[in-house]
Each structure stands twice: as C-alpha cells, then as structure tokens.
Image (tube, rainbow, N blue to C red):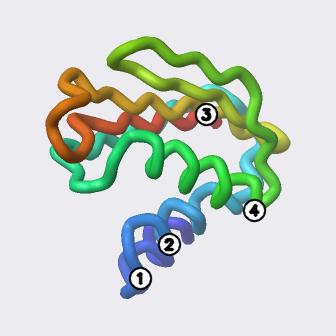
C-alpha cells in the first residue's frame, strides 16, 4: 500500500516522506535512509523547517546536538524513531552540504 501511495502522489518529496511518517508500523527492525546533497537552503533554516514539520504531525523532538560542521536531532512517535543530520563543512559557502534522514521502524 505504501509504495503504491508514493507512486501515485504528485507532491514533493517532503509530502511523500510525511505519508511514510504517518504510517502506523508495528515492529522496529527496519531502517530507511534518505540523503540529500548540495542544498540551497542554509543549515539553520533546514533544522527549523524539519523540526516544525515533524512536530506538526505529532513527533517529539528529542536530543539536539551541534558542532561547527554538524547538527543532529532525534525524534520519535509511537514505534517510529529517527535522526536528522545536517552537515555543512564550510559555513562561509551558501547552502548546505548534505542532510541525512534515518528512520527506524
């Protein structure tokens, strides 16, 4: 059902991700990893956007950690846990190097 839903959706990748995140999944033995690279948005915008959107659909933002090149936060809802990692090796350069979304279900 989930794959059929994704293939028929004409919305953005975020809309497809939200469809996945809303699924009620019983066991936690699978991992989905999505990686985006060379984004135009700044790291802080990306962090704020994903935290807000995840909260809107019922996720709880847990641990947040930051250093000079990496920001990470964990989130969970029911039996779905995740980590969003935002990497930006050169703060002087516009944009963000990569985002990695890990979902454990």
N-terminal label among 3 and 1 = 1
Distance between the alpha carbons at the discs numbered 3 and 2: 17 Å
What whole-number distance in Å separates the C-alpha atoms at marks 4 and 3? Answer: 14 Å
Residue 53: x percent and y percent? 64, 60
SS at mark 1? Answer: loop
Which residue was labeled with disc 1? 11
Q: Which residue is mark 2?
A: 15
For marks 3 and 2, the one nearer the N-term is 2
Q: Which residue is depicted at the point 15% across and 37% down?
A: 93
- Helix, strand or loop at label 2? It is helix
Q: Residues within 10 Å of mark 3 (few under 14, many from 20)?
A: many
Instruction: Mark 4 or mark 3: name the one nearer the start of the chain.
Output: 4
Q: Residue furthest front?
A: 92
* Labels 2 & 1 near each other (Cβ < 8 A): yes
Residue topped by disc 3: 82
Instruction: Give residue 84's position: percent from left, percent from top.
Output: 51, 34
Q: Residue 89 falls in which quadrant of the image?
A: top left
Give the CA separation, mark 2 to mark 4: 12 Å
For label 2, count other residues whose C-alpha is less than 10 Å away and answer few (under 14), some (14-19) or many (20+).
few
In this rendering, position of residue 5 left or right of residue 19: left
Nearest the camera: 13 or 25?
A: 13
Residue 25 locus on image (x, y percent): 73, 48
Residue 77 at what x, y percent from top left?
A: 80, 43
Q: Residue at x 26, y 36 (%)?
A: 98
């Amino acid at each position: 059902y989930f794959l059929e839903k994704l293939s028929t959706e004409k919305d953005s990748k975020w809309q497809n991700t939200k469809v996945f995140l809303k699924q009620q999944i019983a066991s936690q033995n699978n991992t989905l990893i999505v990686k985006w690279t060379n984004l135009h948005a700044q790291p802080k915008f990306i962090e704020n956007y994903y935290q807000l959107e995840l909260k809107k659909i019922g996720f709880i933002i847990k641990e947040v950690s930051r250093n000079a090149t990496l920001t990470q936060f964990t989130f969970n809802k029911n039996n779905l846990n995740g980590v969003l990692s935002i990497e930006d090796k050169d703060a002087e350069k516009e944009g963000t190097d990569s985002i990695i979304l890990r979902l454990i279900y």
